[in-house]
Each structure stands twice: as C-alpha cells, then as structure tokens.
Image (cartoon, coloured by chain):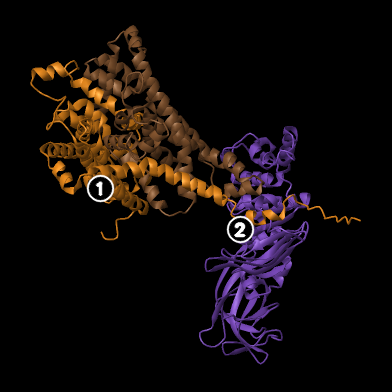
Chain colours: A purple, B brown, C orange
Amino acid sequence: MTIEVRNIIKRFGSFTALDNVDLRVDTGELVALLGPSGSGKTTLLRIIAGLDWPDSGSVAFDGEDALSRGAGERHVGFVFQHYALFRHMSVFENVAFGLRVQPRRVRKSEDQIRARVKELLDLVQLDWLADRYPNQLSGGQRQRIALARALAIEPRILLLDEPFGALDAKVRKELRKWLRTLHEEIHVTSLFVTHDQEEALEVANRVVVMDKGRIEQIGTPGDVYERPASAFVHSFIGESIVLPVEVREGRVRLGDRELALDSSDARPGPSKLFIRRHDLAIGPAGSGALEGAVKHVRSFGPTQRADVLLNAGGEGTLIEIDAPRDRELKPGDLVGLQPRRYRIFAETA
Amino acid sequence: MGLTLMWLSLMILIPLAGLFVKTAELSLDQFIDIITSRRTLHALKISFGLSLAAAVVNLFAGLIIVWALVRYRFPGRRIFDAIVDIPFALPTAVAGIALTSLFAQKGWLGAPLAELGIKVAFTPLGIFLAMIFIGIPFVVRTVQPVLIDLDAELEEAAACLGASRWQTLTRVIIPSLTPAILTGFALAFARAVGEYGSVIFIAGNLPNVSEIAPLLIVIRLSEFRYADATAIAVIMLIVSFLIIFLLNRLQNWAQARALTAG
Amino acid sequence: MTVVTTTPIPRFEVAARQTAKSRRDVRSEPWLVRWLIIGFAVTFLTVFVVLPLMLVFSEAFAKGIGYYLQTLSDPEALAAIRLTLLTAAISVGLNLVFGVIAAWAIAKFEFRGKTFLVTLIDLPFSVSPVISGLVFVLLFGAQGFFGPWLASHGIQILFAVPAIVLATTFVTFPFVARELIPLMQEQGAQEEEAAISLGASGWQTFWRVTLPNIKWGLLYGVLLCNARAMGEFGAVSVVSGHIRGETNTMPLLVEILYNEYQMVAAFAIASLLAFLALVTLVVKTILESQIKEGRPPSDD
C-alpha cells in the first residue's frame, strides 16, 4: 500500500503545523518522520490516520482518496505514544478489540478471533501475558502489546507515534532492533514519528526530516547524514562544527581570513560552514584550510578531544575537534585543520 | 494524637456505642418484632427502594450531565457546572419546602403535571424526585474529574481499530469510568436513604404509603418509643456500613486498575 | 437497447455521502446527539436545581420587600438567627481545631488503626442526620444513659442549646479533616523536617510552615463546615425540642412556619439560608482555584 500526501496545510489558530507538505511512501517501506517537537511530524501522522483533518491538500492510499474516510474506515494501525491500552481489559482482550468491534456480517468467529490473537501474541513474543492487565506489564511489553493490537485488524498501513519515546534507553535499543526485524517479517507499509535521529537512522529505510511544518529532506539514512540538504538537517542530524563564514566572489572567508575551500556551489552572502567532526584532518600548522592553537586536551576512550582556537582574526572562534589517541597534542600546539568534507549553506534570514 | 483519639471517641464512638447498647437491651424477638412490623417494613421499603431507584436515575442523568459539562461548550456551561453543587449546599429544609411548593398542585411544575393527571407532592413520586435532587451532585462530582482526565488516545485508539462511536462509548469509555460511576451511585444512594429534610415536606408522610424510615424514627422518638427508634436506626446503620465497605472495596479495585502508567 | 455501465467496485464499503460525516473529530458526536445531551443536562438541572432556587426567592418576596424585612425582624426569627449563628460558631470552632489535629496526625504519622480512624471521621457523612440526632437523645434523654444523672443535677442538655451544638458538631465533624488529609499527605513532611532541622520548635513549625501550606484547604473545609452547620436540619430537629424563641434554629423555624402555612415567612427565612448557600458556592469556587494554583490571591 502506498501513501501519497499532497499539499497538506494544517493550521491550529495562527500556528501553521503543516505548511504545504508532500510525501510519498511506497509499499513495504519503513519510513521515519524525524524532527524536533513542533515540527509537525505527529500532526502529519494523525492526518494520515484520520485523527486530524488538514485545512487543504489530499491524502491517498494506493491512489484512492483517504480523506473521505473516517479513522475507523482507513484500516490503519496506529500505535500511540503512550500506548493507549484499555486498562480494564486483559492483554488478550486488548488485542482482540479490533476484531470484536467489526460489523457482525464480517466478524470472525470466537475461535478465529482466539487463533488470530494467539498468532499476534506469538509474533510479539508475549503469548504468556495474555491474561495479564496492562498495569501489570513493563513499558516495553506494553509497547509490543499496543503493536499487536494495531496489527490485529490487518492494517494496510502501520503508523507509530514516538514508539520508543516513553521507554528507558536500554529497552529502547532492544525494541528498535526488534521493530526492524518485525517489519522485515510482516512487510506492511510503516511510518513512525521520532525526534531521536539515532532511532530514525538505525530503524528506517528512508528518513523524512521535518522542521517548522515543512519537509527539509527525504532520503535514505545515508543520504540525510552524508548529504544534508539544508543547514537545519546538517545541524539536526549528527554533530557538526558550525562556522559563520562569508561567501564573496567565489571565496570563503572566516573573519578576516580567507579559507582555501571550494565554494563553487555556494551562494554569495553570509553563510554557515558545516563540518562533521570526524571529517576534520589534523596536521601541522599550515597544512589545512583552517588553523588554530590547541587550548585544552581531554582523552577518553579511543579518541582525544581538543579545544582549538581558530585563527580567524578578531578574538577567533573556539571549536571542539576529535583526534586519534596516538596523535600527540598539547595546549599551545599550532595545528592545521583540513576538512575532508564540508557543506556551505547560505544564512537564512 | 491522644487528643485526637479522645475527641473522636467523645464525639463519635460513645454516641454510636450508645446506639448499639440500647439495641442490646432488646431481646432478639423484640427486635425482630419491631423491624418486621408492617409500618416499619413499609418505611424501610420506601426508603431503600426509592433511594435505589433515584440513584439509578442519578447514575444515568449524572453521566449525561457530566458528558455535557466536560465535552461540550454551550452558553451558560460554567453556571450550570457551578449549580450542580446546590443540592449539596442548600440546607435540606429549604430544599424540602422549595421542592414541595414547586411540585404542589398549584406549583410552577405541579400545576402542569396535575393537568396531565400526575400528582407529585405528598406521594411516593414526590419522595423519589426529592431523592433525585439530593443525589445528583454525588454522581456528577465523582465522575467529572475522571472523565476530564480520561486519555484522549484511548478513544482514538478505539476509533482506529474500527470501533463505532457507540462501541467506543460502551466498551472503552464507560468501563473506564465504572469505578467512579459506582462510587457516585453508592454515595447518592447512601445520602438518599438517610435523607430527612428534603424529603419530609414533599412526602406527605402517610403511614404505609409515603412514610420514610428516618421520619418513622423521629415519630417513634416523639412517642418515647426509644427502642423502636433505635432498632430502625440500627438496621439503617448496618446497611450504611455495608455501603461504605463496598465503596472502599470499589476504590481499591479501581486504584489497582488505574495504575497503568501513561 | 440498453447500455450496461459497470462501475468499479469500491475497495471500501464507504459511500461518498459519508464524506462530510466522517470528516470530524473521532472524539465527538453528531450534531443532533450533542444537542440532545446538552438539552437534557440543561433541562434536568433547571428543573431540579434552578427552579427550586428561584422559587425560594420568588416566594420570599411575594408580598414585597417591606413585608420580607418585617418577617425577618420578628423576634422569633431574630432568636432563630442568633441561635444558628451561635451554634455554627461553636461547632465550626471545635471542628476547626480538632480537624487540623486529626488531619495532621493522620497525614504525617504512621500508626496502627489509622484506616479505622479515617473511617470513623467519615462516619457522620454516611449516617442519616436523624440517627445522628437519635444517639444524643439516647445519651442525654430522660430514659438515656446520662439522663437521670443530669436531671438530678439540674443540667439540661437535650431539648436545649447544648444538644443542638453537640448534634451540629457531630454532623459537621468530617468537613475540615476530610479536606486537609489529602492536602497534607500530598505535601509530605519534608518542609516540616527542614524547619525542624533549621532549629524551629514544633510550635513554630506548625505556625510558620504547616499552617501557611494548608490555609486555603483549611478555609475550604471551614466554609463547607459552616454551611452545613447553619443548615443542619435532621439531627437538630431531633434534639431541639422545638421550643419557640429558644431552641429553634433557622431551618427549624422554616419548618414550623411552613407547617403553619406562613409561606412568605417560611420562604423569607429560607431565602437567607439559600443566600448563604449561594455565597458558600461562590467562595468555594474561588477557593478551589486558589488551592489548584497553590498560591495566595494576587491582591494578598
């Protein structure tokens, strides 16, 4: 099942939650909607589910209009951030709920329902919890039951809102891996919302990066990390060193210093230079586009980290760099820094 | 601490103990004779039966009122929300004479009802209405906070799973509110059983027709038949205790269920 | 000749006419249902609450404001008002002091029989006011436990002011403690412990830490306690003896006047009590917002 979202605009009062959003998700994909809070990612998910309605635009499943249907008629499985398990029902009844509320003429027999619930509980590896109540489960178990419940109605699309948001770090990692494996097994078109880049990059086939109601970039985890399309994406995903530069007549200037960097695809004007920390090669003074003095060195684990005051005229700019442990660095050293890879984005007003 | 216990004993324990000591002066046969006399039985039946019926009405009416107050915006909503407490705050004697005049044959509502051939004041129907009046805040005020706090995601989850609005209401919302609804129901019932002031004016107080148990206690006292009064009181107390006991059980059960972390 | 047009079978059973209907919040009901519910709620509350209340004032002023004032200044009415105020003052005072102590003991300490104590405090709420009155008759009446002894010493409790005060205190016992227990439990003992560790005495801790923390809850409890104390009917009715001008509180006088078909007079007294109830509700609403915010009013 494909999902096609076109020109979606959604406002809450004067706040624009979604500003002309277009998105296409192909059958069997596992897509992450990644962005900071307030970026509109959950609103988009809720519109696809039929829990919210856009002010304009269209949503189609396999080419058919979805907006003409209510949430109950879209056959979408939704896993809520706080699971929304029915606390007065056992785990079994929670999973069976979607089957029991079907219209009588299509409803499965009690035996079929039992078999189906058992199958789902096996799938999420929690069949031994069937008679428990939600309050007797751990967070991770609740999450998996919520997923089993959503899958019970054989959804054509699975939507997950911050699926790991309420879990502690360790459980979160386990569940991530588990969700990936599960998706490979059932292969239903899935879309999940997260504000955690690591989660998005690790779990999804494709990542949709959102900010302020707009989609900033859509790409594979490799794409969005290696080839960020905007300053926002570069700073939101992965750690970056950001330097305020000026592009003028094809040259890049940091303060009063001209940097020997290619700026052929950069627009003139005040800009930001983004470099991943691990893309910065350290050499002796004069060996790189950037130069500076080491101020402070800290060693831990396989690397050491150093504060370097860049020589750029004025007071200079302090940056933090990573260096291999075997490279000798001490305060006072002058070093040359050469970015192996970098991006320049024009400053947006 | 000692002071607290002493005060409690003075104010509550001793008086109540007195009640049971007084009853103990009766032989079992006498006790049974008193409470099974036609008039007593009828008064108990009126008190408990009508209270139960009124509590059932309050349960449904209260639920609808809570729903309107919590889920909808309409003109005057805040005022209506505030006046739900009136039956609780209004002195019972005032409520009693007001309801009686309202439903009397020439009253604002009594007159049109009389045209329809319905007589309210001085009949069991009047008692029933007065009991609905005093019970309504209990259901509304116990269910209201629970409905306000009810997680919106629960209803959305049900809708996504294909449940109709009615199925969501009966299978998800009402069960989630059940502990609060039952608590409110029990409170309204207990209050109606013991109610005196709001009821006696409108009741008419005809023995074996519209006489409530608390009034019979008062009558027996005024006849200096203390034993009779005490026996009826003890029966009412035992039932009240049972209700409190059930209430506590209910709340424990509700708490056990409500621990689901969000 | 007929042209047979085949329409593609829709993948879902939903017809287009549902478009408008399904385009709404899944947590809302159709327009008609919504207004039926609101209509029911408004009608129910109007019939059972608004109309009785309006009736009280309408009857009280049926013969004009002059007659109303004249009724209220009748010596019997004045005596009833005085007795009601006196009774409420004593009962509220007693329950204030002991309510705070009881709540404090329950909220801050663990001891055996705590649940029993809480149940005991709640008891007057669930006992019929008539039974509350009855227990005092049994204790102090002519055939009661202390009756003969009291009679031989010439002390009159039953059918006199002391019994009225006792019965009122009994009935209003739970209000203050009930209100304070959850509040104090929620606040825990940390602030008190901090005060003690800073060298405050127990008494200083109470006045400077505990009391300011609970003042709005306390006021709330006192307010409800007072409303009930002034309006109590059943319990007081049983113990008062209905001696005109002496042991009649306002609610009792309402009953007597009503039974004597002095409607305007009965409703005039009733209107005072109803007014008290309204004021109580207004203050209660204000206090509730104060308790919620947990801070003193802005004009404080």
Instruction: State the image coordinates of residue A208 (x, y, percent, origin top left).
Output: 68, 65
Instruction: State the image coordinates of residue C161 (x, y, percent, origin top left).
Output: 14, 30
For the C terminus of chain A, which image quadrant?
bottom right
What residue did someone put label 2 on? A52
What residue did someone put label 1 on? C205
Furthest toward the right, the residue is: C1
Looking at the image, residue B206 lies above or below residue B177:
above
Asked whether the beta carbons under mark 1 and mark 2 sit within 8 Å of each other, the answer is: no
Residue at position x 21%, y 40% in the image:
C264
**Nearer to me, B231 or A347:** B231
Residue at position x 36%, y 42% in the image:
C49
Instruction: State the image coordinates of residue A323 (x, y, percent, origin top left).
Output: 64, 72
**Disc sitting over residue C75 in the figure:** none
Judge left or right: residue C243 versus residue B66: left
Does residue A57 appear in this view? yes
**Nearer to me, A119 or B15:** B15
Badge 2 marks a residue whose secondary structure is: loop
**Nearer to me, B99 or A148:** B99
Kind of residue at disc 1 = Thr
Q: Chain of mark 2?
A: A
| Callouts 1 and 2 in the same chain | no
Kind of residue at disc 2 = Asp
Mark 1–mark 2 Cα distance, whole angstroms, equals 53 Å
